[in-house]
Amino acid sequence: MTIRQSLLAATAITVAFMTVIVAARAQTTSQEVVLTNVSYDPTRELYRALNDAFAKEWQASTGQKVTIRTSHGGSGKQARSVIDGLEADVVTLALAGDIDAIARESKRLPADWQKRLPNNSSPYTSTIVFVVRKGNPKGIKDWPDLAKQGVAVVTPNPKTSGGARWNYLAAWAYELDRTRNVKEGGDQAAARKFVEAIYKNVPVLDTGARGATTTFAQRAVGDVFISWENEAFLIQQEFGADKFDIVVPPFSILAEPPVSLVDHVVDKRGTRKVAEAYLGFLYSPAAQKIIAHNFYRPSKPEAADPADLARFPKIQLVSIDQVFGGWTKAQTEHFADGGVFDQIYKPTGKAATR
Amino acid sequence: MSDAALRGGTPPGVRWRLRGLSRGFPKPSALPGFGITFGFAITYLSLIVLIPLAVLVARAADLGLDGIWRVATTPRVLAALEVSFFISAAAALVNAVFGTIVAWVLVRYDFPGKRLLDAAVDLPFALPTAVAGIALAALYATNGWIGSLFAPFDIKIAFTPLGILVALIFIGLPFVVRTVQPVLQDLDRDVEEASATLGATRAQTVLRVVLPALAPALLTGVAMAFARAVGEYGSVIFIAGNMPFVSEIAPLLIVTRLEEFDYAGAAAIATIMLALAFVTLLAINALQSFSRRRFGHA
């Protein structure tokens, strides 16, 4: 082949490819409504199931075909995409603080968004538990075990991962609760020392929950992995119950991953009705059943399968509002630039973290 | 450059450039079309490079010069910049040596599978860097194929600065190979033969005949590999461990700032990186034009 011929051939192939792609896309976009749900990392499996169920229900009741595109990533990163202009009809993020940030920075939804749906706009909750290697060789039972010397703890960086913020705050809340008898409301200084001791045991700070899961489960780094409860079950399911045990501490934090409409976007795209129905659907008995089945704690347990519910042990749970006075306060105090978390890492920490 | 030039005389190239500077534009080229192509070049560069970078600097300027300086000199940022720039330089140097050897093998010898190997060199360009990072982390973790070989000696690669080095070598390799390869291909073998007939040993031929001819291309390759490595994010975060003050790279700090919605702070760190990279590249460029003149590839 001459150069000219091969150039022609290459162009022809490229054009053919593009035509196929464009044609394929055109087919899916006709005669249907598309919703974009911007979600966080560990909800992949959950929303795959929920989206299918909602699409069926919506088509049955209205005759309209609905496709829900769900994007996943670190909660903070997802929030930033929406602030920067990603057209999300609904956001389903790891913590209220991230949706607050969207409301504050972009004004695309009202500041009181969290009051619009039941249970602080959280159709499901979760909590923070530990995953350990089979047989629990380091004998980890409760939060103080994570601060012991010689225990390697895997948790992502709370500055880049929403889930990790829950981990951090759960540890803090534990120590406050423990020292409640010593000091009214708990000893903040002791809590800080306690959290610092745990982070001294962290050999790798991944940027997101899924990255940390991989580090712990596949790279064999660490003795204990602080994790969302739902993610812990998924690890067992994915990698085999013969490899990992779940340890549920007697005390943990009530994680409420909230959902919201993005008013500005649904009004512009004319999708308010279907988006509202979608979020409403999350509270329906059918969805609650799926939620429990996917290892999230349903807000209406009576709708769930009792066998699924039996997997959630009873724990004493405290909320962010009770202990930290809400997300905005927790965020500025602990995770802002130069906040408590940043202060844990000092140049002198070099030798200790090696 | 001749010995006279080393002692202080101005070489012809430099003199010409100095004159050019003092008179604005040099004499219009005899080649037609300067106006229109120059216009296109400037518009294009502005849209793609200059304006975005200007916006970046403008964002950072919100903080003022002292604000940028304050961000730059926090110990955490300094440590991250050190990690980024030193490891990038190390990776570029490793690639300079081994990339040249790869190029040499690909140009000078025939062996089965040569084409395949040649094509494989470009793969780091095409692969999403996150995929590369995950693959490398899997290989170099203490339970991975390669990592387990080092584990008995208590050497950890993944999740340490060594892991960053591995990732940066990976993404930088094609730059060196692809810049050195064509020059090596064009290199006249007669020159080497002449060198041999004149009594030079093999080492002398390589060091004093082949390498000087390759130097400008090699420098370009190293500069590109270095620049790419400094900005690399995707592959590094999966293998670095990301520990502050140990294995935290500057781009990660930028991302962290963005997570906090601190756009000005992020832009400040980015501006500092930009300035540092620009100075480094400028130095390499100067070195390169020096070697061009020195070895006559002007």
Image (cartoon, helix red, strand yellow):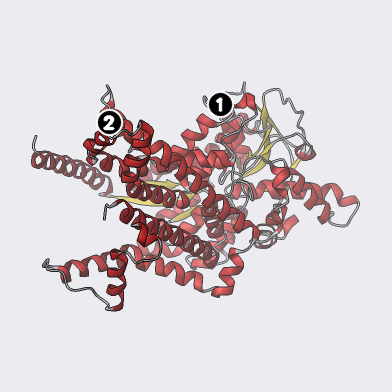
Q: Is residue B77 above or below residue A163?
A: below
Identify which residue is drawn at 28% across, 24% down: B113
Q: Quadrant of the C terminus of chain B?
A: bottom left
Residue sticking out furthest to the right: A182
Toward the bottom, the furthest residue is: B23
Q: Marks 1 and 2, how far apart in space?
A: 48 Å
How many labels, in total? 2
Q: Quadrant of residue A84?
A: bottom left
Q: Secondary structure at mark 1?
A: helix
In this view of the protein, can residue B179 be seen by the observer? yes
Q: Is residue B86 left or right of residue B46?
A: right
Disc 2 designates what residue? B108
Q: Which residue is mark 1?
A: A239
Above or below — where is B196 with respect to A261? above
* Left or right side of A235 for B45: left
Image x and y of residue A159, in percent: 61, 53
Q: Is residue A285 in view from this perspective?
A: no
For residue A185, which quarter of the picture? bottom right
Q: Badge 1 local density, few (<14 within 10 Å), some, or many (20+)?
A: few
In this rendering, the answer to whether A231 lies above or below A283 is above
- Three-letter amino acid code at disc 1? Phe
